[in-house]
Image (cartoon, rainbow, N blue to C red):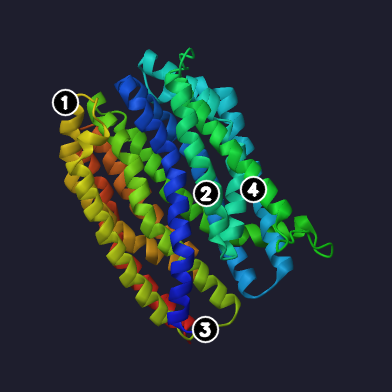
Amino acid sequence: MNSKTRLQENVSMAWPLAVNVLLVQSMLMIDVVLVAPLGEIPVAAIGIATAVLMFALGTELSIGNGIQMLVGRAYGSRKQADIAVAFWVGLFANISTSLFFFAALFLYDVEIVAALIGDEDLANKVLAYLAITKYIIPLAAFTQVCTAFYNGCGNTKITLKGFAIEVPINVVLSYLLIYGAGAYSGLGFEGAAWGSLAAVTLRTVYFVFVLKLDSRVDLRYPQERSFFAEMRPQLSEILPIAINFFVLFIGASVYQLLFAQLELASFVAITLIFPWLRIGTQFVSAWAQASAINISQAIGHGETRHLKTFVSACTGAALVLSLGVALLFFLLSQFIHLIYPNVESETYLALAVIAPLYIVLPIARGYNALSGNVLRALGESSRVLRLNFIVQWMITLPVCALLILYFDVSLFWAFVMMPIEELLKIYHFYWYTKVALGSANR
């Protein structure tokens, strides 16, 4: 299959992936937008609670990306047994991880929140939100494995349909639960949490029925292969990819927790803009994931002749998408007051201060996302992990913590560490990708 054909496949896979991500991230945005009229404290509480939840959900998403690569390779080689093994080992890993995080929040939620914030009113609202949304964690573990399975098989529209059902119900139900209707007065702040939990439960039910009714799916575990014997080789491939995504995903949550130490207006501004950042940058990430799935399938099928041309075309498309996202962020900065009409003037000022930074951020992040996914598909997960870990966890996060906690800098100088992180990675990603493609084409 030539690079042009694979690019066409990329488009057919990428747009449902992009919409999937848009709909996933919109769940958090729905809560923020709907709760914003209730005041700054509820918005800040959702920001902190979301950062805590993302430690668990980010890990599940990370494991899912590892499963996705294995399923893509097995699907490309037409090995049904390998697909089933990847699914069940991945499901075991994700469910086990989710139960660990759920137990931690169930037993130590008060201690975790107390370590993050000192304001009693804010802490109580965070605890109230987590008391409900922690049940999302095991449900999301199952749905993430199902999403990875269908994405790896190139059938991204299955997951798209689930989210297309879920999100409208989430919006309507959350609004009614927050503000009520008629004689029903609503639950206020906690209604947002119940709406999100109901939406994820609906998605779980959807995947149960899809897997049961889809005649093309055969996930019966091969009897000749021991499950526990397969765990080690499968996890040895899943974990480096999972840790890569974990480093990035959890790093974003750590940034948000550090920003929580700024003054309230600054943190509220970041809480309002973070869902948009996640959604905008994930458009390019969806293209990058589709490229990685295609490369994995090509390697599984033994087709590597056109990889260099294919990756070059994907990189150009990713840069165009990144510029488009930057333009949309510019428009967002101009009309932010229409989206959030009832926030304090100090919050509007804080949003204006960081606007130049979040506008340029997706350009560098888009290239790095594409290169990282390509390298993972080419078997270079460990190299990507080292780069991400060194830059983010040994340079930018410690510097950001130092600036906020010790030097007490303003919002601009704290937030600037995010685009600096992406700039530090660009050259290395360029060089690693060039070397890896040269080796793959030999």
Compare marks 2 and 1 and give the one earlier in the sequence: 2
Q: For residue 238, say whether it is visible.
A: no
**Which residue is label 4 attached to?**
207
Between residue 209 and residue 408, name the one nearer to us. 209
Q: For residue 89, say whether it is visible.
A: yes
Where is residue 337? Give x, y as percent. 20, 34
- Secondary structure at badge 1 equals helix
Numbered tag placed on residue 61 in the rendering: 2
Query: Quick check: 338 above or below 361?
Result: above
Q: Quadrant of residue 367?
A: bottom left
- For marks 1 and 4, give the one nearer the viewer: 4
**Which residue is label 1 attached to?**
345
Cα gap from disc 1 to disc 3, whole angstroms: 56 Å
Q: Is 21 placed left or right of 87 in the picture? A: left
Where is residue 264? Give x, y as percent. 26, 24
Where is residue 219? Give x, y as percent. 74, 59
Give me the residue at 23% from left, 30% from top: 266
Query: Quick check: 169 above or below 422?
Result: above
Compare marks 2 and 4 and give the one earlier in the sequence: 2
**Which residue is label 3 attached to?**
1
Where is residue 381? Give x, y as percent. 49, 63
Numbered tag placed on residue 282 in the rendering: none
Q: Quadrant of residue 386?
A: bottom left
